[in-house]
Amino acid sequence: MAAQALRFRHVLCPTDFSPYSADALSHAVAICRAVGGELTVAHVHPRELPVAAEFSYLSPAPLEPQERDALAARLETFAEPARARGVTTHTRLLEGPPSSELVRLAEELPADLLVTGFYSDARLKHLLLGSVTEELLRHAPCPVLTVRHGVGPASYAGMPFRSILCGADLRASGPEVIAGALSLAEAFAAELTLVHVLEQVPEFEPGSAMQFSMVEIQAFRQAMAEDARERLRAAVPEAVRERLAVRDLVKAGSAHGQILRLAREEASELIVVGARGHSTLERVLFGSTSRRVVRDARCPVLVVRGTLTAGEHAHATARLHEAVV
């Protein structure tokens, strides 16, 4: 069954009223303007438990009416640029744990896209992304567009994204990512580059049990690359290639490194990557490539959730077991 194309009929954009949120809002507005989608701008007021541990069983106090009115007014002011651009805009003021409340709201709307800004401190690269962003990337029921600090606001002149780079996963769980990138390229009349990175290119060290000549090793690597090119070609129907500018690339190295390098060299305006799984396995699965691309990209990154094959599920389970024993 073919993967479903992305349709952004309703976009959800959470805000904490920071400059990063304002940049994210501008990208959400640009997308809604381009595709005719509706926008919901939401703020979640986190309820804090009393400091005294002995009272921690009590329910946190809700906002006082005056506080709630002030926050609602601030939210309306924050959302005004969207309305000024002609986008049908709603606001929602919520209370509770931000990530879980936003996931619940995304399910309720339902949202086809969640757009969020976040700050990434280069000094803390060994840590997770901002906690709310991390949770949304793991649990949101729809694709998540991240706008990192420093990306800046979107341009309202023309389409929001004119060049898209897709980290193409050629495993059985990857069609959603490629289909999503294709549907965006069509919606925004953008050029699309599909790149598959061969991360596990075998190395045969001298003295090992398996001895191959350099010619044989090079031939093996070329065969792997050619197979990947053929599969990339097959992933996009010829009829689609006739109306879209689609380019196929195969690289070797670290996936996140190659994706980020290409995005910089080609001034990509959007990166599309995948994240798989819907369970506690995501602590393993949403990691290396997707997290690093989201954290370090100089342009917005769309994370599209895929599904796990039985083999990938078993492999991830083994990795999770290794991580906790």
Image (spheres, grey):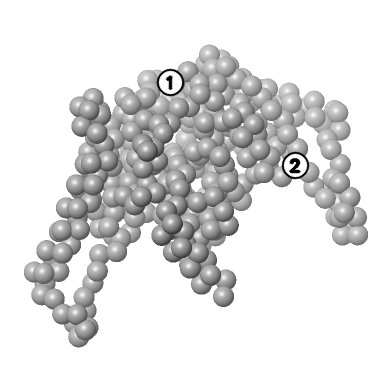
Is residue 90 placed above or below 124 in the rendered structure? above
Instruction: Using the numbered discs, state the Cα–Cα distance from disc 1 to disc 2 in whole angstroms.
Output: 33 Å
10 Å crowding of disc 1: few (<14), some (14-19), many (20+): some
Residue drawn where x is 13% and y is 76% of the image: 212
Marks 1 and 2 close (CB-CB < 8 Å): no
Q: Position of residue 304 (x, y in %)?
A: 45, 42
Specify whether residue 264 is in view. no
Figure check: 89 above or below 304: above
Q: Which mark is residue 96?
A: 2
Q: Tell me the SS state at disc 1.
A: helix
The answer to whether residue 255 shows anywhere in this view is yes
Q: Position of residue 249 (x, y in %)?
A: 23, 46
User: Which residue extends farthest left?
Assistant: 215
Rendered residue at 32%/46% (across/down): 168
For this rendering, which residue is in front, 166 or 321?
Answer: 321
Q: Quadrant of the C terminus?
A: bottom right
Element assignment for label 2:
loop
Q: Any mark on residue 1, and which?
A: none
Q: Quadrant of residue 92?
A: top right
- Residue at 41% across / 34% down in the picture? 4
